[in-house]
Image (cartoon, helix red, strand yellow):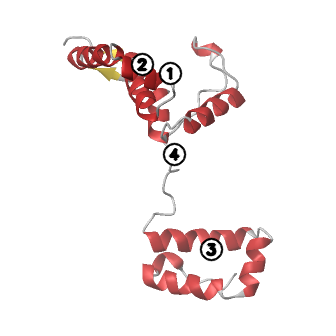
Amino acid sequence: MTDAPNIQAMSPEQASSHLAALESNSDFGKLLSSRDLAAYATLKALSHRINGVPLDAPVASPITLLPVDTASTGGPTMARSEHLEQIEQMRQRGYTDGEIADTFRDDREFAPEFVATVKAEWSVLESSEQFRKALVAGDFEARRQLRAYSWVMSGNVKRAA
């Protein structure tokens, strides 16, 4: 692995060809299966180069975890494991990583007009017997609408300028 070519200087096509050659090399496969760090670094660099992703690209998930010591900030205390469990439960319920990240953002603000519109739309939905039955039955679309309403209502209303 010490004679590795400069992957960042390769074109995506060259990187793809080099990866194909490595895939056919049983020694490289053995290095990967033995968790060799250099082999993983090579595979990562090639994958990034082929797909046009910078090596120092940020992590794909926008979710940031709460500080470990939230009691000192005046916020609720939640263990790291509890926070991770909450995130996993949200994913299982259909939240995207973006929605989860937005849920934990403290700086969500909405214009008063927008909040009023959302409240009016929700009151129409809430008065529908069909919608209430669908929500109780766990209908995906009804739950999505409840999540959207809850997300807006749990944010801050912008003050008039």
Q: What residue is disc 4 on?
A: 61
Seen at 69% across and 88% down, the residue is 25
User: Can you say which quadrant of the picture contains the N terminus?
Assistant: bottom right
User: Tag 4 or tag 2, which sits nearer the N-term?
Assistant: 4
- Is label 4 or label 1 in front? 1
Q: Do the residues bearing badges 3 and 1 touch, measured as CB atoms within 8 Å?
A: no
Q: Do the residues bearing badges 2 and 3 touch, measured as CB atoms within 8 Å?
A: no
Q: Residues within 10 Å of mark 3 (few under 14, many from 20)?
A: some
Q: Is residue 87 left or right of residue 48?
A: right
Where 125 falls versus 31 (above or below)?
A: above
Q: Do the residues bearing badges 2 and 1 touch, measured as CB atoms within 8 Å?
A: yes
State the image coordinates of residue 134 (x, y, percent, origin top left): 44, 26
Q: CA distance from mark 3 to mark 1?
A: 51 Å
User: Can you say which quadrant of the picture contains the C terminus?
Assistant: top left
Seen at 41% across and 28% down, the residue is 142
Residue 20 versus residue 121: which sits nearer the camera? 121
Q: CA distance from mark 3 to mark 4?
A: 23 Å
Where 24 falls versus 161 (above or below)?
A: below
